[in-house]
Image (cartoon, rainbow, N blue to C red):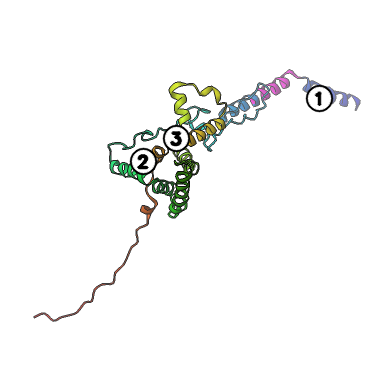
Amino acid sequence: MANNHNNDTGSGNDSESSPLLTNHHVAAEAEDEKKSNVDGKSNGVKVPPGGKSEAPASAGYDWTANGLPLGHGSVMGEPMGRSLWDSSLFACLGRNDEFCSSDLEVCLLGGMAPCVLYGSNVERLASAPGTFANHCLPYSGLYLIGNAFFGWNCLAPWFSYPSRTAIRRKFNLEGSFEALNRSCGCCGSCVEDELQREQCESSCDFATHVFCHLCALCQEGRELRRRMPHPGFNAQPVLVMLPPGEQTMGRGA
């Protein structure tokens, strides 16, 4: 019995210390590691030599001050390019295109009734009827008070300049600060992030309305008329069904 037990134990030790069995385990581990590497490459995950996959690092997305992700550009992390205004600030008569009559209307409204032009711009921007009076009347009051007590329209720009900021953000237009930096390159060093850039752009929008108020209103009006229809033109067609006319049956002659 003892001999048989010793033989069994010896055979077990021999099987555990067998070089063929060791080689079989090594080959199986190498095959598993190879499969894990292939799976990691197919999933885009970098697998270290130990065979344990690492979790992919989270993509670093950044956001602009107006809610646009910086990943919209051609390269991840590159800001999306901004569009230019359709007409310049001092192009009061607009451009010679299919909107030339509308540009003349904007020029006349800006020179004679800026309150009407401002209310129309906000109404188009909000795309909701009824906002005209809510903005035209307060603007008219500030316009009259400024001209009566200070001799010029110095109060209404404080009320109207947010519309220029809203137009610039809605259509992703280039602001005055960015245009100045692009032309002379003297302002880029003082801006550290997108939030500071947006604050500088808002300050430039305010300055544009204070010093070039009528030109700013006209430029915004031309831009909105080319990009957005008047909300009054968005009425849905109504199908009207008329009853048939009175019919009489007559006997032919």
Please, which residue is most extreme toward the left here? 253
Indicate whether residue 92 is drawn in magenta: no
**Within-10-Å neighbours for mark 1: few <14, some 14–19, many 20+:** few
Mark nearer the N terminus (1 vs 2): 1
- Judging by the rendered image, the residue that carries numbered circle 2 is 222
- Marks 1 and 2 sit apart, C-alpha to C-alpha, by 93 Å
Could you say which is closer to the camera, residue 134 or residue 115?
115
Q: Where does residue 10 sit, x and y in percent of width and height?
A: 83, 22
- The quarter of the picture where the C terminus appears is bottom left
Residue 22, magenta (yes or no):
yes
Q: Secondary structure at mark 1?
A: helix
Residue receiving disc 3? 211
Q: Residue 61 location, x and y as percent?
A: 57, 32
Residue 103 appears at what percent x and percent y?
32, 41
Residue 12 tag number: 1
Element class at badge 3:
helix
Q: Amino acid at mark 2?
A: Arg
Magenta residue span: 18-31
Which amino acid, by three-letter code, is at mark 3? Phe
Marks 3/2: CA distance?
A: 19 Å
- The crowding category of the residue bearing disc 3, from other C-alpha atoms within 10 Å (few below 14, some 14 to 19, many at least 20), is few
Vertical order, 52 against 249 (above or below): above
Question: Which label belongs to residue 75?
Answer: none
The count of marks equals 3
Indicate which disc, 3 or 1, sits on the residue closer to the N terminus: 1
Camera-side residue of 31 and 42 = 42
The mark nearer the N terminus, 3 or 2, is 3
Query: In which quadrant of the rendered image does the N terminus lie?
Result: top right
Tell me the amino acid under the disc marked 1: Gly
Q: Which mark lies nearer to you, 1 or 2?
A: 2
